[in-house]
Image (cartoon, rainbow, N blue to C red):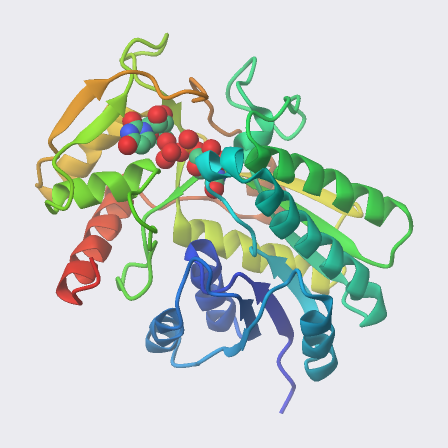
Amino acid sequence: MKEKTKILVTGGTGYIGSHTAVELINAGYDVVIIDNLSNSNREVLDGIEAITGVRPTFVEGDCTDMDTLRRLFSEHNIKGIINFAASKAVGESIHKPLLYYRNNLVTLMNLLELMPEFGVKGFVFSSSCTVYGEPDENPVTERSQRKEATSPYGNTKRISEDIIRDTVHSGAPIGAIILRYFNPVGAHPSALIGELPNGVPQNLIPYLTQTAIGIRKELSVFGNDYPTRDGSCIRDFINVVDLAKAHVIAVQRLVEGKTAEPVEIFNLGTGDGVSVLELINTFEEATGVKVPYRITGRREGDIIQVWADPTRANTVLGWKADTPLTDTMRSAWKWQQHLREKGIM
Ligand code: WQD
């Protein structure tokens, strides 16, 4: 029997990592996950196994530790890496910048340094639309200007992109694909995996679903006086399973040596801007559940509007985010109900 191609998913028990592990297994890859469980838990592996029938190999460990990684690469013949292992809370990063720079950048540098040593050719990196800041024009393309970061978290994404570019251009025998995500939302339709926010959610959808189920009294809508069609901010909400599938295509492209450039960059979004108020309406229509909300003041640092031009990913990767937003909202709601049934939240 032909041996399956082994892919390392760092941060693979996290929100996007776990959905990507599922899609990799479904596509016939052998998945090795490394995660320090700082913002996830082991039960996620049960969810992945329940969906796919396969339990991925799991290494509990921290990617900032070179010895742990070296051991992992010696034990597993890894062909490609998808790097999700990172801290991602914008607010926290302002109070703990060194934690963010250490976790996100040391992890990245360790992996890039070890790749040539172990013959790993492909690297997929989780970047973010945060690198575009407040864009001069929407939708943003990959050629749109990157702006000064407004948080240490955002800065780690920008610096990471530069580190990857410089490393690949220095002649290291590796290829990289940088994926810039817009706003990933929703959960696997089975509701066996999803987003597990720590404490009070900072992001819109987990706060919204927790309000809908009664954990929170009301959702605060941060501003309705922005220069947008209804005054609330506009984002490009992308279904997490659609997003996960793009990673499978990207890593395959790298492993099979089909990239057109040593470092490729793709926006991953739907191409549609949806306002916060429109999103609340869509959720209510899709689920039949009312979300009590109140307009409050603006949140400091919020971008007014940003949405993707995903043409490059559509044409070059042959990938499209095509799950309707109503289905995505239903999946987020089903996941919240699953958490309640399991007594998790
Ligand atoms: C979306 C919109 C809020 C909560 C952040 C990071 C980004 C990315 C995803 C991460 C905004 C509004 C929110 C609430 C609200 N990457 N909102 N009430 O800020 O677009 O992006 O997360 O890992 O890099 O910056 O996402 O979900 O926090 O906010 O009105 O209780 O919802 O003002 O307009 P954001 P978000």
Q: Residue at x 8, y 41 (%)?
A: 288
At which x and y percent is residue 41? 39, 67
Q: Residue at x 48, y 44 (%)?
A: 320
Q: Looking at the image, how many numbered discs can be counted on the residues?
A: 0
User: Residue 51: in sight, yes or no?
Assistant: yes
Indicate left or right for 40 with 206 as reference.
right
- Compared with 70, 96 (above or below) is above
At which x and y percent is residue 326? 24, 41
At which x and y percent is residue 217? 12, 36
User: Residue 29: in sight, yes or no?
Assistant: no
Q: Residue at x 81, y 70 (%)?
A: 119
At which x and y percent is residue 287? 13, 44
Which residue in the rendered view is the most extreme toward the bottom?
1
Query: Which of the pair 252/89 is nearer the observer?
Result: 89
Image quadrant where one finds the N terminus: bottom right
Indicate left or right for 170 with 300 as reference.
right
**Picture quarter with ligand 1:** top left
Image quadrant where one finds the C terminus: bottom left
Query: Which of the pair 68/291 is nearer the observer?
Result: 68
* Picture quadrant of residue 202: top left
Indicate left or right for 324 with 294 as reference.
right
- Compared with 277, 172 (above or below) is below
Q: Residue at x 20, y 50 (%)?
A: 333
